[in-house]
Image (cartoon, helix red, strand yellow):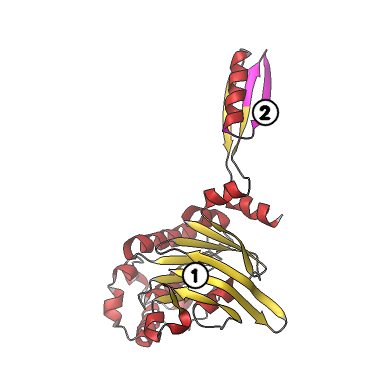
C-alpha cells in the first residue's frame, strides 16, 4: 500500500529525514512513533504531496506518488495535528464546504457507511466552538473521509483527549478498517493506545527508522521478554523472587514443590511498546 524508499529531506543545512525506509501493508493500522522533531509530520506531508523530498521516492499501491493524478491522490487523506477550522461554522456547514471541494454530494456522503459510524445527526447544527475537543477531533476525521480514501494518515489523533474520547476514536479507526478496508498510518505519543490498536509499528529517530515490524517480532529482536514475580512460603517464612522467563518460572516452581513449599502467587510482568521504545532510545 505505502512504501518510503530512502527518503531524505533537508531544510537548509538541517536534515529532517535521513534515509527513511519502511513499508505499510494494505488494510493495516500502522503505528508511527518517535520523539518530537524526529520527522514524522515531515514524512506525512511528503506522502501527501504537500512537500517535496530532497531525495528518495514514496510509492502508493506500487506507483510513485509523482505519477499519481489528482484524482488518484483523492484516495490519500491526512489529518494534521494542528487544524484551524472556521469555528463559527456549524458541523453541517463545514461538511458541506468539504463536500464542495471534493465535488461530492453532501447527502450521499452523510449517508455513507463511513460517516454514519460517527452518528453525526445530533450535532450537525452545532457550531464547532460549542463542541468538545473530542467531538472536534471526530469532525476532523469525518472531513478526512469525504474523499472516500483508501489510505489515511492521522497525526496525533489522541492528543488532548480524555480516556473515553481516546477509546471512542480508537474504536472508530478499527471499524473503518474492518468495514471499509482502509489503511491507517498513525503517529502518536500515546504508546499504550498504539500498542492496543496497531498491527505493526515503525519507530523513527533523527529522521530514519530504527525499527519496523510486528510488536512480538520487535520484542524478540531487542531481547525483551515477559518476566514473572513469585511469592511462596517455606518453613513458615514468606519469600519473593523473580523468574526471567517461562523456563525459569517452571524450574522455580519445581524447586518450591520439592522443598515442600507453598506457592502463594505468580504475577506476569508484561512487556509493552513503552519498554521497546525505551530500550531503543537507551
Q: Is residue 219 above or below residue 201?
A: above
Q: Position of residue 102 (x, y in %)?
A: 36, 85
Tell me, yes or no, whether the highlighted magenta stretch contains residue 237: yes
Q: Is residue 58 above or below residue 164?
A: below
Q: Is residue 255 left or right of residue 73?
A: right
Q: Say what secondary structure mark 2 lies in.
A: strand
Q: Position of residue 51 (x, y in %)?
A: 55, 83
**Residue toward you, 84 or 193:** 193
Q: Position of residue 63 (x, y in %)?
A: 43, 76
Q: Which residues are magenta?
A: 231-246
Q: Who comes first in sequence, dot 1 or dot 2?
A: 1
What is the number of callouts on the image? 2
Q: Say what secondary structure mark 1 lies in.
A: strand
Q: Residue at x 52, y 81 (%)?
A: 84
Which marked residue is nearer to the observer: mark 1 or mark 2?
1
Question: In the picture, which quadrant includes the C terminus?
Answer: bottom right
Q: Is residue 122 left or right of residue 255?
A: left
Question: Distance from label 1 to label 2 (Cα)?
Answer: 46 Å
Q: Please identify the dominant SS of the magenta region.
A: strand
Q: Residue at x 44, y 74 (%)?
A: 60
Residue that numbered label 1 is attached to: 3
Q: Is residue 82 left or right of residue 197?
A: right
Residue that numbered label 2 is attached to: 241
Residue 79 visible in the displayed image: no
Tell me, yes or no, whether the highlighted magenta stretch contains residue 168: no
Q: Is residue 255 above or below residue 108?
A: above
Q: Are marks 1 and 2 in contact (CB under 8 Å)?
A: no
Mark 1 Cα shell of 10 Å, populated few (<14), some (14-19), many (≥20):
many
Amino acid at each position: 500500500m505505502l512504501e518510503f524508499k530512502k527518503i531524505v529531506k533537508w531544510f537548509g543545512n538541517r536534515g529532517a529525514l535521513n534515509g527513511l525506509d519502511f513499508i505499510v501493508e494494505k488494510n493495516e493500522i500502522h503505528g508511527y512513533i518517535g520523539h518530537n522533531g524526529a520527522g514524522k509530520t515531515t514524512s506525512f506531508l511528503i506522502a501527501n504531496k504537500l512537500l517535496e523530498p530532497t531525495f528518495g521516492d514514496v510509492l502508493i499501491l506500487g506507483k510513485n506518488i509523482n505519477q499519481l493524478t489528482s484524482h488518484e491522490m483523492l484516495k490519500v487523506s491526512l489529518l494534521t495535528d494542528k487544524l484551524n477550522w472556521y469555528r463559527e461554522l456549524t458541523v453541517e456547514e463545514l461538511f458541506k464546504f468539504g463536500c464542495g471541494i471534493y465535488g461530492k454530494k453532501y447527502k450521499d456522503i452523510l449517508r455513507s457507511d463511513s460517516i454514519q459510524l460517527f452518528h453525526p445527526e445530533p450535532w450537525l447544527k452545532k457550531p464547532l466552538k460549542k463542541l468538545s475537543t473530542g467531538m472536534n477531533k471526530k469532525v476532523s476525521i469525518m472531513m478526512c473521509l469525504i474523499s472516500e480514501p483508501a489510505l489515511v494518515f492521522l497525526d496525533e489523533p489522541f492528543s488532548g483527549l480524555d480516556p473515553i474520547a481516546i477509546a471512542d476514536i480508537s474504536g472508530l479507526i478499527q471499524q473503518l478498517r474492518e468495514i471499509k478496508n482502509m489503511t491507517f498510518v498513525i503517529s502518536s505519543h500515546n504508546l499504550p493506545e498504539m500498542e492496543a490498536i496497531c498491527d505493526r509499528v515503525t519507530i523513527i529517530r533523527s529522521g530514519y527508522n530504527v525499527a519496523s515490524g510486528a510488536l512480538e517480532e520487535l520484542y524478540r529482536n531487542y531481547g525483551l521478554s515477559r518476566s514473572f514475580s513469585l511469592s511462596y512460603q517455606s518453613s513458615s517464612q514468606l519469600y519473593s523472587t523473580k523468574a526471567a522467563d517461562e523456563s525459569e518460572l517452571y524450574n522455580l516452581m519445581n524447586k518450591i514443590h520439592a522443598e515442600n513449599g507453598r506457592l502463594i502467587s505468580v504475577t506476569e510482568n508484561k512487556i509493552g511498546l513503552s519498554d521497546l521504545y525505551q530500550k531503543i532510545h537507551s
